[in-house]
Amino acid sequence: MQHKIENVEALWPRINRTYKFDSIEKKSMPCDPHDPMAAYEVAFRLSPNQAKELWGKMLEAYKAKAEPAWPAQPINPFKKEEDTGCFIAKAKLRGNYGGELSKGVAQYDMKGNKLAPDFMLTTGSKVNIAVTMVPYNMREAGVSMRLRAVQVVEYKEMEEQNPFGALDNSAANEDPFGLPPVAASKSKPIEAKTFDDEIPF
């Protein structure tokens, strides 16, 4: 079942290439698409109404595919943000299925023009997301959203963080190394006649 999720906020997108979680680095890192854990993925923020609509579509897909032995209802994959009242969901595409590489996630601009494969979508950008609903019943029953394409509605520029704070004049004039003041030089001033020679250039 194909579905478009419209005008949501992208969170931690990793769709320019495949990534997997690195237990040493404690974060997702780029990896070869042949890796069993390789995937493209993007989380996104939904308003309560958007979450309700998407959940309804997921239930439709589940009921259309569910076998008699399956649970009556799938698990709800959304996580609620207590401070905003919004919900967080995730769409994902594995780098390969049974060893056959995925085609990746197509990215488009507002006019429908295809963006470069290595285009870096940013957190906070507004997007439309095309997914395929895939119901399943394994250790638990649910509906995964297999990521197909993303359209950038509003791109959010990455903000550069200034590592320096403001300094007042007194702080600016202090020696940052805490060295004692240098005593005034006792050497004699250079006599003016030193410069009387003709300058050779």
Image (spheres, rainbow, N blue to C red):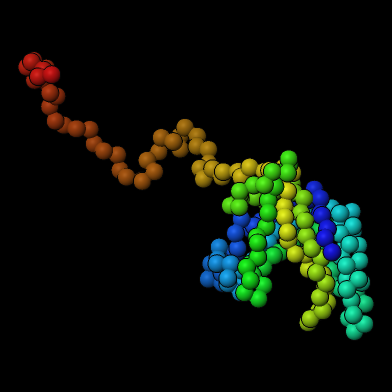
On the image, the x and y values in percent for residue 114 come to: 67, 47
**Nearer-the-camera pick, 9 or 170:** 9
Question: Residue reaching furthest bottom?
Answer: 69
Q: Vertical placement of 161 versus 200: above or below?
A: below
Residue in view at x 92 percent, y 72 percent: 63
On-image quarter of the N terminus: bottom right
Residue in view at x 80 percent, y 48 percent: 7
On the image, the x and y values in percent for residue 110 come to: 73, 41
On-image quarter of the C terminus: top left
Mark yes or no: residue 89 visible: no
Answer left or right for 166 relative to 179: right
On the image, the x and y values in percent for residue 33 come to: 58, 67
**Nearer-the-camera pick, 104 or 157:** 104
Mark yes or no: residue 134 visible: yes
Q: Quadrant of residue 5?
A: bottom right
Residue in view at x 70 percent, y 58 percent: 42
**Nearer-the-camera pick, 53 or 96:** 96
On the image, the x and y values in percent for residue 45 come to: 77, 54
Q: Quadrant of residue 50?
A: bottom right
Residue in view at x 19 percent, y 32 percent: 185
Number of marks in the rendered image: 0
Q: Vertical placement of 102 versus 120: above or below?
A: below
